[in-house]
Image (cartoon, grey):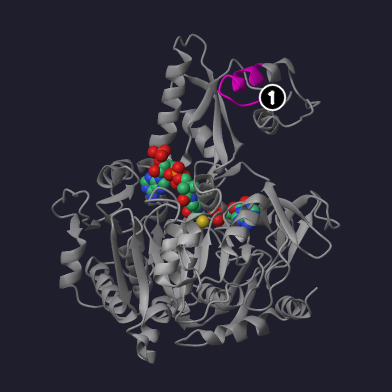
Amino acid sequence: MSEKLDQLQKHALEKPEEYWAAAAEAIDWYKPADKILDDSGAPHFYRWFKGASCNTCYNAVDRHVEAGFGEQTAIIYDSPITGTQSKISYARLQSKVARAAGVLKSLGVEKGDRVVIYMPMIPQAAIAMLACARIGAIHSVVFGGFAAHELATRLRDATPKVILTASCGIEPGRVVEYQPMIEGALAEAPDIIKNVVVFQRDQATWNMKEGRDLDWHDSIHNAEPADCVSVEATDPLYILYTSGTTGQPKGVVRDNGGHMVALKWSMKNIYNVDPGEVYWAASDVGWVVGHSYIVYAPLLHRATTVMFEGKPVGTPDAGVFWRVIEEHNVTTLFTAPTAFRAIKKEDPNGELVKKYNLSKFRSLFLAGERCDPDTLHWAQDILGVPVIDHWWQTETGWPMASNLLGVEQLPIKAGSPTRAVPGYDVHVLTPEGETLAPGEMGSIATKLPMPPGCLPTLWNADQRYIDSYLSEYEGFYATGDAGYMDEDGYIYVMSRTDDIINVAGHRLSTGAMEETLSELDDVAECAVIGVADNLKGQLPLGFVVLKSGVDKANDDVVKEAVSQVRTQIGPVAAFKHCVVVQRLPKTRSGKILRATMRKIADSEEFKTPATIDDPAILDEIKIALQGIGYAQ
Ligand code: COA
Ligand code: AMP
């Protein structure tokens, strides 16, 4: 289909060391690698650029200043929610990051120590991340939409010395104060952190605790700038927790060297962005998209990145994305399909686009959830630029499948993120591990070793890494996604093979929600499934069975359940629907039939499973669901 792409893929898979050594030339190393791909830990553990030393912050900031680009804008902060904007040049960024790194050093943070960052979409979040990278500390950013309990879980696992935070985040119509969240988490996970550094925002005041809390402004003002330290390419840059199948999130580890090489390569080859251009990932620093494509990749590439604190609709309207593109000369936008569904709902004919000059805008990239063909076509029609669905996950850190706009654009097939990116050997497998023929549905896996940038392991959990990803198919990394490939090698990602759901592009575990619900005193058992939603793609829906003797109105139970998930996991879970049922449908061996329940809720056809214990329960489930507007 494309000789150029075929050749790239062949090269990357047959001679991976040669291929990635060439890509690594775009990075400044203090010392080159002794071994490009260290496979001494095979069949499970592979390390890229073994023996090399480097610094990610140096490559993302300092080297651009040294090369004479200090005056170029590094970060554009555009916050319609607060009505503010600012620009930070590479030179100013260097000075701010060096001082923030100095603050960390003065608090005793050393190479290898962990620092938790709990911040909204403000430039200080990027500065905090880069400051950690500068001194070799490992950051772990926690998304602001997670509640205290989730933060505590991450604190216990990462054991950071310091938390960098702000007094609040801002959501439409409400100020989200961070102090109660952090105090709650520290009460649940005591004796871990020593200090909290707080960026005070005008919208809320943090009540400083003597001896523990420091003011971001004051301490940075007084700090000695700290230099970049040399770290091993294989040293961790960050830990990012992502939903697993239980309440214990997985700490995805990212290294320094492979990460830089992969991200830098992706900026030109996938996104077709050149240094000096403006690239905008409309996501949040708390997600992998924020790590890779708000902070690290654009800065490594000397592009200008946009940090947008707002929503696609309502801040103030569904034209805000077009306003930002016009005002800042954005060439490339990356967001989740759900953002476009939200815009389409408000402005179905794309009238607002016509008000803005989008002449510099070249392409839209979508990821984070399956992109339904309707949304893709609508975006193409109103924007008149290529709309590129691409597929990846927190674990890989950069796209596994995409149209490579910087190499050669392949025909767009709606519903497919195109073909595997060079370096990823993607297969669709049977449960026995046989590669399936085109068109046949199976589990999507990539052959080991994966290219640079992908997770080398899980934080403090090598065995969990093997169990979660590598043990299902020998020699493969199981992505947890299911789908098929067509004759042209286009991949179609259709669903998950586990209990992870995608709500407005946010990855959530229904298993974690079940664990939380089962903590309620009145609940005997429960199930949470993901049901289809026109706007958010999926929404969680809960079923609870009460303990015998509980005499409470169903409405009260539902209210408690909704509040439990919101306070324990966070508002981002968007858990708003729940029903009380007498029993849950199960197999004779006691397994809850969640897939059948989902089909009933989504009004899809289903077969009563042969293994069901009591088929009559399905009717009870249907009636209960009809009561809340599902299963019509
Ligand atoms: N801090 C605190 N609360 C947050 C939050 C944050 N950083 N982010 C979201 N929330 C809250 C929201 O306020 C909302 O609370 P509510 O139940 O009180 O209304 C809840 O979490 C759900 O948020 P969200 O999923 O964002 O839904 P929404 O209805 O506010 O907005 C969209 C819907 C589609 C506009 C929004 O999800 C969106 O912009 N999505 C873009 C996708 C994206 O960024 N994906 C990231 C991966 S690429
Ligand atoms: P996250 O780790 O939060 O980035 O979520 C990753 C998961 O989102 C993937 O494993 C997929 O299930 C889903 N996903 C991401 N991008 C796509 C896409 N382009 N098409 C279909 N599913 C996607």
Query: In this view of the protein, can residue 150 be seen by the observer?
Result: no
Residue 559, quarter of the rendered image:
top left
Q: Nearer the viewer, residue 599 or 344?
A: 344
Q: Residues within 10 Å of mark 1 (few under 14, many from 20)?
A: many
Please tell me whether residue 477 is drawn above or below residue 611 in the rendered image.
below
Q: Position of residue 373 (x, y in %)?
A: 68, 52
Q: Where is residue 159 shown, x and y percent of the image?
A: 37, 55
Give the x, y percent position of residue 395: 57, 59
Residue, disc 1: 586
On the question of residue 72 being in view, the answer is yes
Q: As displayed, is residue 570 above or below residue 280?
A: above
Q: Residue at x 30, y 65 (%)?
A: 85
Q: Is mark 1 within 8 Å of ligand 2?
A: no
259 on left or right of 126 = right
Q: Nearer the viewer, residue 470 or 271?
A: 271
Secondary-structure class at tag 1? loop
Q: Quadrant of the N terminus?
A: bottom right
Q: Is residue 12 magenta?
A: no
**What is the span of residues highlighted in magenta in the rendered image?**
620-632
Mark 1 belongs to which amino acid? Lys
- Residue at horizontal 42%, vertical 18%? 556
Q: Nearer the viewer, residue 437 or 382?
A: 382
In this rendering, is residue 227 above or below 598? below
- Compared to residue 155, the image places residue 28 above or below, namely below
Q: Position of residue 37 (x, y in %)?
A: 63, 78
* Quarter-of-image position of residue 534: top right
Q: Residue furthest left?
A: 210
**Which residue lies at the image location 34% right of the left edge and 65% below the top edge?**
77
| Residue 338 appears left or right of 206 | right
